[in-house]
Image (cartoon, coloured by chain):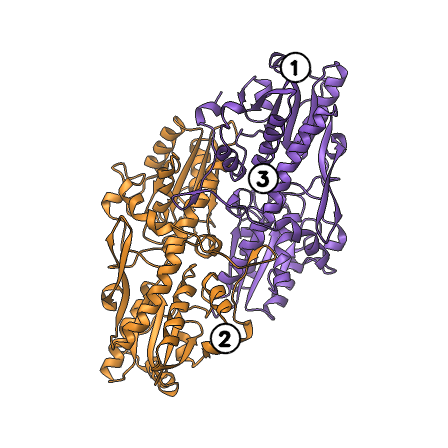
Chain colours: A orange, B purple
């Protein structure tokens, strides 16, 4: 009999708790697994021996269902980067102490690029000291920027939010008789996946978003203004989707000053809004989708949530088969009907790497998205989860604040 | 036989098109009504004789259902204030010309405070020139700041969005182990209704929002910082709801400079974020719910949408009974079960007035909301509409851009 531990790391998504449920439910089925420990605040919980017995917290089927529909990370999160163990072994010793004390034979880490670095380092270290603890990564990120895997859990729900909201913002923007520009700032760090997903509206016959700027294409203010002017000649209300990660003149994104000496406390959307106001002089506003794009679980994609749970379950099986240092990945084997299989990849190839939009997903002008991209996005946003509500509001599963504190 | 005209005005909501559907469906039932004209861009469409025959655009039951779930104003909107006709009769003459030419016997205006000013002025003018055109106001505003009526269509859906999203932001905010403050900026102009609605989470056992600042209470930065520090001693992640309309040091809201000489391009949330960062020095962020709070029809309250349609229908009946210069209002006659009746009020008492949160809805300290307020909000956010989707995204009804242009 062994115990297992699971932790969640990095930025919140709508699907991380579904992966936790996958780990939990699969572990319950496996007779060799006794306790299922949740590590509080990612790897920090293992380091500090701050674990909770999940069976004592997730008590009923209703709890499980609530957990699936709860956004963010119910076990807390962290942004902790392990040092190279050749240089600093101290924290590794703490981790080993906890694992041994708790008789943990497998550690499942749900996270993004940085967390897969932890999976890679820990599995290497354990191999080196001959400690039989399997380490498996369960991917998640709304940025969809993990290598090898077709896509990442969390992305589909974020994309569904972005497309739905962009649709509604389009309706909101078109009402007045004067020409206007609406700039929607979308997350995704250095990759344009999430911003590009707003273009699925084109499949619904919408002309919006009329312009889409992603970090994969070098951005010029002159080109942007020229694009906006051209779209304004065709549409009364021009809708622009822009990635938070596009590169603009130095100093803007760092929040210092722009070329014009203005201080910008906000992001790229607000910056471009001001440029349009000054240079074109029309009605203009910017909308930052902010954390809502990663935590709006009321709009979660069923495909995404189901896959997130499946990949959590698969991770447990993978560990019990004796694998370690692996990350669970999706391979898309058919577009119609959409079919994926879950496979494994070495964590070292996923850790600290980023995957960008391929060239054929971006149009020739570099200011919009192609049909190939829309075909890729479409299956990921399908289906709705049926929500348990209370007082008209979706309910959440939460661990009491006092448990989350050290 | 007469024709009728309907128009939509002011800021978008999720329920304005439901009121349009109410007008449309009721008019179809009444044999004395022939054509149902939609005026493009509010009263501007009447002035410019820019009308569309709604029967030629809304063709099927499916169109009607789509229209109900479409946010914003399908006929466009305006921010047009009629002059006093004693001083400037020119535009009134244009209006009369259109009404006579199109044989319009009743005009239904769906809008907020300003639109009810138009209802009042037009009905007075028509009485004065003995023109038999009835003018009826159908209220809407997410601000919920219209006098006399218990609440306004559009508010319930916005409140449901605010509460649901605040719930999700709370989950998102609590994940890291370091103390943090999250400031959520909410619309509502000079009234705190929408901001206060975020406190319905208390009924679900949430401690968030821990602080709620509404324009009805005078705001002090010192008090705010003291409140935040006190909540930080109790909660790791402090969640603050703040109205866009609270009064802060001069110059901030006007976008010029604050006391510290900084230029603020954003709203109050960003301003307070910066104050917390400087004075308390903890992790802090601000989230502006922006236009999403008024256009997220995927989260519409069924109660709100049904009432919006009912009040549109009632407006037509009211006009056909020969009333004019009236606004349709709700009176809540029972809390349990929640029951409202639709009545009429004179437009002159609603036009250009605002209704604020009553004292008993605000706590003694002036920094949170009472249970009485929550009891008031709760029935307004109940129920979900079943959405027609395409490609995983709620569909919308839209009139072609070329029709909306003059």
> Disc number at residue B15?
3
Residue visible at 49% across and 30% down? B60
Occupied quadrant, residue A402: bottom right
Q: Is residue A43 left or right of residue B121?
A: left
Q: Is residue B196 above or below residue A44?
A: above
Marks 2 and 1, Cα distance to the nearest angstrom?
Answer: 69 Å
| Quadrant of the rendering where the N terminus of chain A is positioned | bottom left
Occupied quadrant, residue B102: top right
Q: In front here: B117 or B262?
A: B117
Instruction: Provide residue A253's location: percent of width, then percent of height.
Output: 39, 50
Residue under mark 1: which chain is it in?
B
Q: Is residue A213 left or right of residue B12?
A: left
Is the same chain shared between marks 2 and 1? no
Disc with the residue nearer the chain's start (1 vs 3): 3
Q: Tell me the SS state at disc 3.
A: loop
Q: In front here: B194 or A267?
A: B194
Quickly name the residue at label 1: B96
Residues at marks 2 and 3 touching, judged by CB atoms closer than 8 Å: no
Q: In front here: A85 or A40?
A: A40
Residues at marks 2 and 1 touching, judged by CB atoms closer than 8 Å: no
Quickly name the residue at label 2: A57
Residue under mark 2: which chain is it in?
A
Instruction: Provide residue B6's location: percent of width, then percent of height.
Output: 61, 26
Q: How would you rate the neighbour count of disc 1 (Cα within 10 Å): few for under 14, some for 14-19, many for 20 or more? A: many
Q: Is residue B358 above or below residue B30?
A: below
Q: How would you rate the neighbour count of disc 2 (Cα within 10 Å): few for under 14, some for 14-19, many for 20 or more? A: few
Q: Is residue B234 left or right of residue A258?
A: right
């Amino acid at each position: 009999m062994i115990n297992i531990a699971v932790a969640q790391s990095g930025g919140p998504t709508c699907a991380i708790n579904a992966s936790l449920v996958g780990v939990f439910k699969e572990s319950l089925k496996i007779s060799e697994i006794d306790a299922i420990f949740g590590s509080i605040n990612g790897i920090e919980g293992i380091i500090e021996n701050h674990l909770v017995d999940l069976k004592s917290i997730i008590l009923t089927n209703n709890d499980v269902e609530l957990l699936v529909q709860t956004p963010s990370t119910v076990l807390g999160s962290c942004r902790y980067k392990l040092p190279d163990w050749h240089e600093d072994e101290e924290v590794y010793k703490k981790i080993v102490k906890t694992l041994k004390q708790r008789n943990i034979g497998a550690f499942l880490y749900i996270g993004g690029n940085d967390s897969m670095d932890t999976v890679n380092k820990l599995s290497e270290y354990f191999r080196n000291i001959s400690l039989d603890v399997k380490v498996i990564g369960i991917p998640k990120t709304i940025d969809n920027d993990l290598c090898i895997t077709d896509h990442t859990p969390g992305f589909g729900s974020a994309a569904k939010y972005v497309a739905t909201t962009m649709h509604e913002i389009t309706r909101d923007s078109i009402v007045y008789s004067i020409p206007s520009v609406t700039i929607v700032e979308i997350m995704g760090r250095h990759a344009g996946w999430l911003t590009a997903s707003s273009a699925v509206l084109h499949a619904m016959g919408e002309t919006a978003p009329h312009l889409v700027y992603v970090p994969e294409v070098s951005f010029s203010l002159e080109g942007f203004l020229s694009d906006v002017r051209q779209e304004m000649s065709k549409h009364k209300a021009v809708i622009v989707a822009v990635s938070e990660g596009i590169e603009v003149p130095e100093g803007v994104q760092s929040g210092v000053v722009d070329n014009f000496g203005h201080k910008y406390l906000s992001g790229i959307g607000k910056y471009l809004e001001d440029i349009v106001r000054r240079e074109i002089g029309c009605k203009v506003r910017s909308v930052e989708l902010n954390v809502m794009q990663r935590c709006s679980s009321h709009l979660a994609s069923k495909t995404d949530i189901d896959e997130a749970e499946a990949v959590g379950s698969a991770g447990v099986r993978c560990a019990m088969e004796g694998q370690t240092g692996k990350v669970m990945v999706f391979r898309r084997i058919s577009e119609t009907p959409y079919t994926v299989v879950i496979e494994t990849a070495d964590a070292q190839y996923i850790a600290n790497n980023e995957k960008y939009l391929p060239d054929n997903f971006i149009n020739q002008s570099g200011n919009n998205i192609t049909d190939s991209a829309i075909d890729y996005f479409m299956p990921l946003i399908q289906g709705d989860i049926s929500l348990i509500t209370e007082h008209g509001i979706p309910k959440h599963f939460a661990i009491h604040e006092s448990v989350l504190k050290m």
